[in-house]
Amino acid sequence: VQLEESGGGLVQPGGSLTLSCVVSGFDYSTYHMRWFRQAPGKKEREKVAAITGTGDLWDIADSVKGRFTISVDNAKNTVYLQMNNLNSEDTGVYYCNALHNVFPNYWGQGTQVTVSS
């Protein structure tokens, strides 16, 4: 079982990034796939977006609504987080998570996003 994030990096304020989470080792179609972030110095992770494994329902946190979009490509077993108009408050480690109310939940290792000029 693996959730492998990629796509993070250094970006200037106002810029864009697309994060990818490649899923392998389990059938995520009945899971909720979610993106969390953890800001520097904070212990808690903030949920920023969620989508059903089938891609038919999704939710975006108010803090990023209008700037972030979540999507899933089942042909590639990949969940995406498109992030636009980034600012310094978006800096942090972004994690992919697979949530199920019966089966085990899974986390990726995270990808660093730094927004700075």
Image (tube, rainbow, N blue to C red):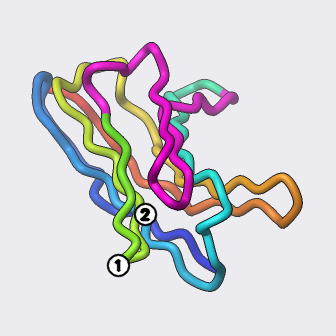
Tell which of 39 and 7 is nearer to you. Answer: 7
Residue placed furthest toward the top: 62
The verdict on residue 31 being magenta is: no
Tell me if I can see residue 55 in this picture: yes
- Residue 16: where, in percent of width, then height? 15, 37
Q: Residue flagged by tag 1: what amino acid is it? A: Ala
User: Which label number is shown at residue 75?
Assistant: 1
Identified by mark 2, the residue type is Cys
Image quarter (top left, top right, bottom left or bottom right) of the N terminus: bottom right
Tell me, for residue 21, which label it has, or none: 2
- Badges 2 and 1: C-beta atoms under 8 Å apart? no
Categorize mark 1 by other alpha carbons within 10 Å: few (<14), some (14-19), many (20+): few
Q: Secondary structure at mark 2?
A: strand
Q: Position of residue 88 (x, y in %)?
A: 29, 20
Give the Cα distance between marks 2 and 1.
Answer: 13 Å
**Magenta highlight on residue 49:** yes
The disc, 2 or 1, on the residue closer to the chain's N-terminal end is 2
Task: Give how far across and how far down residue 55 sits, in percent.
Answer: 45, 54
Q: Which residue is found at the position 71% from the left and 53% from the top?
A: 99
